[in-house]
Image: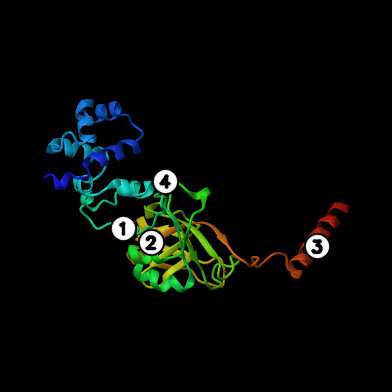
Amino acid sequence: MSERIIYLASNMKVLRNQKGKSQEDLSAALGMSRAKLNSYENGIRSNMPPEDLVTVAEYFNLSIDALLKHDLSQLSAWKLRELQSGNDVFVTGTKLRVLATTVDRENNDNIEVVGLRAKAGYQMGFFDPEFIGSLPKFQMPVLTTSYRKYRMFQIDGDSMLPIPDKSYVLAEYVENWNDIKDEMAYVVLTKQDGLVFKILLNEIKQQQQLIMRSLNPIYQDYTVKIGEVQEVWKFVSYISTELPEGGLTKERIANILKEVQSVVVKMKD
């Protein structure tokens, strides 16, 4: 049994600190004495009885397997929160989405960059930690947070004009696809088309699908069944070396002048 609980003591400390609780607060929440909790955290007691294991695992929304076998101190705060949000397969008994990610030396999540050359590989290797680890990565202090995960994708084509071709889109990982908001922009990884950047309409509850819409009106809307979706990232901002197309054309300026003249004539009358 000792091999199975090798991480119990350190994991108890990690989880307690994550919730910002003292030993006294946590022992009261778990219904055990502070002395007993202290003995678990410091490895004085090596064997936690089944009833206590169940209580601790349920309180922190983790499986007993994760509590005992995995060193939670090696996970970033965001990754630990994701695990507790439902991506622990031992809790749910189902195969759920687990995001491959990278961290820096301080265990902060990096922002990985998926350029055009990596797009095809990303479609096949988005779940592969080795592939994700090979991507360029950087840190942006204003986005360093334990509650959100960001990734950058380079887009191509003119379907999202006025956002220019070859722009880099910064996006935030969406864990719960039911949270997708209508008329908002997202980067979506699909089985058939790979990475696409579109405005979405959420019809998951009604039709089990997403409606994909382009900013460029020459492109028609189309639907993607939710079973074809592999990842969803919410648009945050974009970087481009080009100025967006659009603005006031000569034709538009002429129309505005006509409208002003019409208003002036009416005012005179």
Q: Is residue 249 above or below residue 83?
A: below
Q: CA distance from mark 1 to mark 4?
A: 19 Å
Asked whether the beta carbons under mark 4 and mark 3 sit within 8 Å of each other, the answer is no
Q: Earlier in the sequence, mark 2 or mark 4?
A: 4
Q: CA distance from mark 2 to mark 1?
A: 8 Å
Numbered tag placed on residue 131 in the rendering: none
Q: Check disc 1 and report the residue beneath it.
A: 97
Q: Is residue 217 above or below residue 28?
A: below
Q: In the displayed structure, does residue 250 sit left or right of residue 43?
A: right
Q: Residues within 10 Å of mark 4 (few under 14, many from 20)?
A: some
Q: Residues within 10 Å of mark 2 (few under 14, many from 20)?
A: many
Numbered tag placed on residue 257 in the rendering: 3
Q: Is residue 151 above or below residue 2?
A: below
Q: In the displayed structure, does residue 92 sit left or right of residue 203?
A: left
Q: In the displayed structure, does residue 21 sit left or right of residue 184?
A: left
Q: Check disc 4 and report the residue beneath it.
A: 146
- At label 1, the amino acid type is Arg
Q: Earlier in the sequence, mark 3 or mark 1?
A: 1
Residue for point 23% across, 34% down: 42
Of badges 3 and 1, nearer the viewer stands: 1
